[in-house]
Amino acid sequence: MSSEVRSSDFTLSDSASFAFTARLPLSRYLVDRDHEARALPDLVATLWADAATRVVPLWNGTALVLPGDAREPHLAFLPPAILPPLDPTAIIVYLGRSLDPGAPEPVGTPLLAIELDDDQAASLESDSARWRSLRDLAATLGDRDTGVFAEALGLRNWHHSHRFCPRCGAAAASEAAGWVRRCTACGSQIFPRTDPAVIMLITDAADRLLLGSNALWENNRYSLLAGFVEPGESLEAAVLRESFEESGLRVTDATYLGSQPWPFPASIMCGFTARVASEQDPAALAPDGAEILDLRWFTRQELRAADASWLMLPGPSSIAHAMIEQWLAAG
């Protein structure tokens, strides 16, 4: 399933009736992360021996889904007994306890995630169509499954990128039920980190929307401008800087909308609106030529028009989709 949608796929009828953050697919969750339990000795082994525990298997950044209707997928939460024997070198994370009263598992069920190797994944499920990515599933999974997948994938990615101590270079081992890595030489602790990024819905005095095309995308794909927050920088300052760097425009009135995790590999996207500064000519667009190759202003009518079907807009799993949808609904 493609994570992209055509401009005509945006729905407008009910977008104003929901709080913005509640509409962001990856901001949904129904899990108690139960952080205090992470410090319990041998927590993973204890839970692995408990038949009531359920495990989310991961493979190459994908998760296993249950067979059934592809339009309403569900993650596979498996008992430990049907998974490979517990391997202390594998990436295993305690996710917390389920809070979903509508799930097959009772509320309070402890949840683990484990990453399988190729042979283990093929032995568990050889049909590759049942191993699905979060990008594809985020807009169709339920609240608990979406939150579980985002948490598990983010931690899996962190473990892969922090196998060695940043201080001395020695190997780092997982502990605290997957929430800490400790250097095997100097004892330094490494904790999970998330990289903040800002994404901006920029409008001009005529209430047109600025969209840009990234150098890595198809030439008909456009989205909002975005970029990472730099050290010593506020989110609002990052909005102003990134807007200028990518478009050549000075913007003002950076206003926070909401955020959602984006574990590809380790970000949180912080959504803002901003306006072109009154002294700035909106026509003076200057794409940086390296990251952004093209910039265009769009009216609501242009985005809604039938002939806008050529335009590829952000997929429904992204915060950009929700931000554009909200702007379309406002006028």
Image: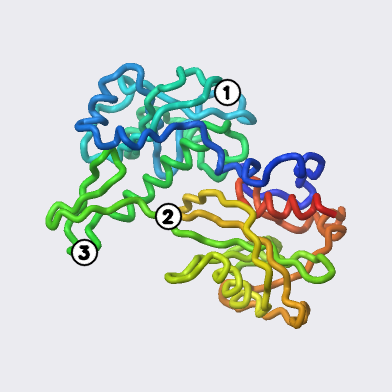
- At x 68%, y 43%, the residue is 19
Residue 209 placed where, x, y %? Answer: 76, 64
Residue 150 placed where, x, y %? Answer: 48, 42
- At x 40%, y 37%, the residue is 58
Which residue in the structure is indicated by mark 2? 194
Residue 304 placed where, x, y %? Answer: 84, 54
For residue 1, above or below residue 226: above
Which of pointers 3 and 2 lies earlier in the amino acid sequence?
Answer: 3
Name the residue nearer the viewer: 175 or 48.
175
Q: Distance between the residues labelled 2 and 1?
A: 34 Å
The amino acid marked with disc number 2 is Thr
The amino acid marked with disc number 3 is Arg
Which residue in the structure is indicated by mark 3? 167
Instruction: Specify the label residue 68 is tagged with.
Output: 1
Q: Which of marks 1 and 3 is in front?
A: 3
State the SS at label 1: loop
Which of pointers 2 and 1 lies earlier in the amino acid sequence?
Answer: 1
Which of pointers 1 and 3 lies earlier in the amino acid sequence?
Answer: 1
The amino acid marked with disc number 1 is Gly
